[in-house]
Image: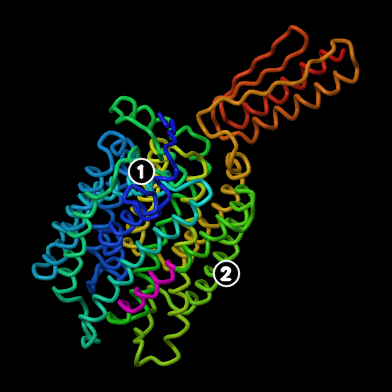
Amino acid sequence: MGRQETLNPDRNSSYFRYNSPFVQVILIGLVCFCCPGMFNALSGMGGGGQVDPTAANNANTALYTAFAIFGILGGGIYNILGPRLTLFAGCSTYILYAGSFLYYNHFRHQVFAVVAGGFLGVGAGLLWAGQGAIMTSYPPAGRKGTYISMFWSIFNMGGVIGGLIPFILNYNRSEASSVNDGTYIGFMVFMAIGTLLALAILHPSQVIREDGSVCTNIRYSDVRTESWAIVKLFLDWKMLLMFPAFWASNFFYSYQFNNVNGILFNLRTRGLNNVFYWGAQMMGSVMIGYIMDFSFKSRRMRGLVGISVVGVLGTAIWGGGLAKQLGYSREDKPEKLDYKDSGSDFAGPFVLYFSYGLLDAMFQSMVYWVIGALADDSAILSRYIGFYKGVQSAGAAVAWQIDTHKVSFMSQLAVNWGLCTISYPLLVILVVLAVKDEGKVEEGTDNEVALSEIIPDSTQNAKVLVTSGIAVAQQFVFSSGSLVTCRVVSGSAVFAASAAAEIFTQRLILLLLTSIALLHYK
């Protein structure tokens, strides 16, 4: 599994072939434009477009609880069903969710919305596992950041268009408390189109890059294999290092949507704000995509620079959020702002909300890039992405309930800022230890190192063995976690060592190799 074939590159040079990675990533971007893009616009209005956010908060809790489970399982399901069935099943649940708020607009019964949220959690787990596998495994290694930013721009255009729907339909309702039926119907139409479009996605074995290589030549997996592979993710040191970033990446939505956009602005202005919030995400994804692909020749260095840029920008934006948050609280809410009537008072909060969107895209694109740099195999990456979305959704489920239980705005801001800040140094460690530059051995292969022949009683050559042993061990330290085999030849003696990827084991190998070299010297 994971073996790549190379076909005639002259027949596959066009970016616009139906079976090219470029077209397939555009297609998955359009699917997400129509489904989660519209969902984001609906959520971004605060309370699902209702005056009381309780129904939306409870629906989102059910959503993200189910998403946490099926996000983790989604990668395995994708490997069993393939992209079309997985994506089609996932997209169909978005229509049900939007319809539940249309129902709530008339009958004020939140049970349907909560149940629909649970179904959407299942569907979203399937959709995002498939999306992540496509977006991270189809592109060539040196263009993953570009393809991620392209997807993110198309996807977030859905939020832009989705923000225009409530803005236009509710333009003359500046005092309205909830959106009209046409808003929800418009969302449902887009979601239905996205569901049908999911059937156009090709299996990875049918997608051919410009150099003639098949993206990933895999067979459909089975339940037993995928179940065991999913269990092992919880012990994978790479996933554990990324856990805080995964948890943080949707945790801030309840705070930003309900307690910034929902508290500070009136209904029609919230729709306008979302146009710019998701537009800012398009800008942010392009910015970080360029850094991650073109800033330096070394992929590892690009990753480190990208994480640093996001870290510095994130600190500045959350600092601005703190400055604004000091001026209001849950008990002392300000008068709602209108983009036309509030004058200069509107500018500062608007820029803050815009900046939150910019940071969201850069943070999540950074996480996707790091995951994509860990492997090149669609089956492996679908599990990684599934784990990411599962943990992300568990965090979101907790966050929505935190808001439902009326936790103070300041406490929510502090937790969000803290989670993001903790993530940056852990991602730096992961990039240093696990991300290889292009052309190096990928995950799942063996790495053999042979030293020159050593004359047994030569002092000089013994010193060479010490130095080489340390160098070999350092290769282990920076390996991506695959099973590694090291062969040291000294006369007729052969020392072979195999180790797992955990850091403490790699350090043990360093000591063993050095000790053997010193014994030989004596």
Image quadrant containing the C terminus: top right
Residue at 17% in and 52% down: 115
In the rendered image, residue 217 lying in the magenta stretch gets the answer: no
Q: Position of residue 378 (x, y in %)?
A: 40, 39
> Which region is colored magenta?
270-282
The picture places residue 111, in percent across and down from the top left corner, at: 14, 57
Marking on residue 207: 1
Residue drawn at 8 percent across, 67 percent down: 107
Instruction: Identify the residue under disc 2.
Output: 316
Q: Are marks 2 and 1 in contact (CB under 8 Å)?
A: no
Secondary structure type for disc 1:
loop
Residue placed furthest toward the front: 10
- Residue located 61% across and 32% down the image: 503
Is 172 situated left or right of 388 in this image?
A: left
User: Is the magenta region chiefly helix, strand or loop?
Assistant: helix
Placement of 157 over or under 374, stated as above or below: below
